[in-house]
Amino acid sequence: GENVEQHPSTLSVQEGDSAVIKCTYSDSASNYFPWYKQELGKGPQLIIDIRSNVGEKKDQRIAVTLNKTAKHFSLHITETQPEDSAVYFCAAYTGGFKTIFGAGTRLFVKA
Amino acid sequence: DAEITQSPRHKITETGRQVTLACHQTWNHNNMFWYRQDLGHGLRLIHYSYGVQDTNKGEVSDGYSVSRSNTEDLPLTLESAASSQTSVYFCASSESPTSGSETQYFGPGTRLLVL
């Protein structure tokens, strides 16, 4: 069945460094790729998304890239800050109201 | 502001008891979802609904049921709680894809412990 693999499961960076989280999806029909941030004790919140007709999207310090041929998409966070520490989930929307989530990446930003 | 709420936020129950978790959204979204979150598994879909009177099973639906009698609410019922159902439960909603948005908006979660 459809699957989204996410790596790494844990990522620790120094404040000010960049962080990259990578995901691979299996269903070539996937056309929408959201990224969610989950802070402790809260529900996931959308931080950025990308559609299959776009290769890259930026929003201030965060960016997402999509390689449809390889079925890869990545989240890039530059100039990381302690408040970026959270769990990040990638997801792939496969149509039919179905969104498949990755297992999550726990990001630690050390001050 | 529109929002999605869940209650209770924390629940302790005993094996075999029936438990209902509430989810209420004021986005007026057609689609609503229930997920469970366990370490190492991310978010797994339990049930979902495309609209009033519509319900569908997700990948981990055994032991759970939902009903949709209005747009705003999708309660999740554990018919006979089991220790394997100890988890954090999230409700989410989204607009119809015909609106061009598949973004899901999540509630704050309910932490359930089954003893």
Image (cartoon, rainbow, N blue to C red):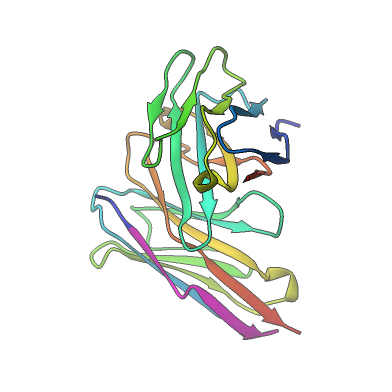
A32 lies left or right of B43:
left
Spot occupied by residue A77 in the image (x, y as percentages of width and height): 58, 73
Residue A101 visible in rendering: yes
Against A13, is A35 above or below? above
Query: Which of B104 and B24 lies nearest the eye of the viewer?
Result: B24
Q: Main secondary structure of the magenta part?
A: strand
A24 lies left or right of B90:
left
**Which residue appears at 73% of the width and 35% of the height?**
B8
Spot occupied by residue B59 in the image (x, y as percentages of width and height): 36, 41
Quarter of the image where one finds residue A13: bottom right
Residue B99 visible in rendering: no
Query: Which of B112 and A84 lies nearest the eye of the viewer?
Result: B112
**Which residue appears at 28% of the width and 63% of the height?**
A71
State how many labels appear: 0
Query: Which of B93 and B81 lies nearest the eye of the viewer?
Result: B81
Where is the C terminus of chain A found, in terms of image quarters? bottom right
Q: Does the magenta stretch include residue B18?
A: no
Range of magenta residues: A4-16
**Which residue appears at 55% of the width and 79% of the height?**
A11
Against B53, is A25 above or below? below
Spot occupied by residue B23 in the image (x, y as percentages of width and height): 63, 29
Spot occupied by residue A5 in the image (x, y as percentages of width and height): 36, 64
Query: Which of B89 and A102 lies nearest the eye of the viewer?
Result: B89
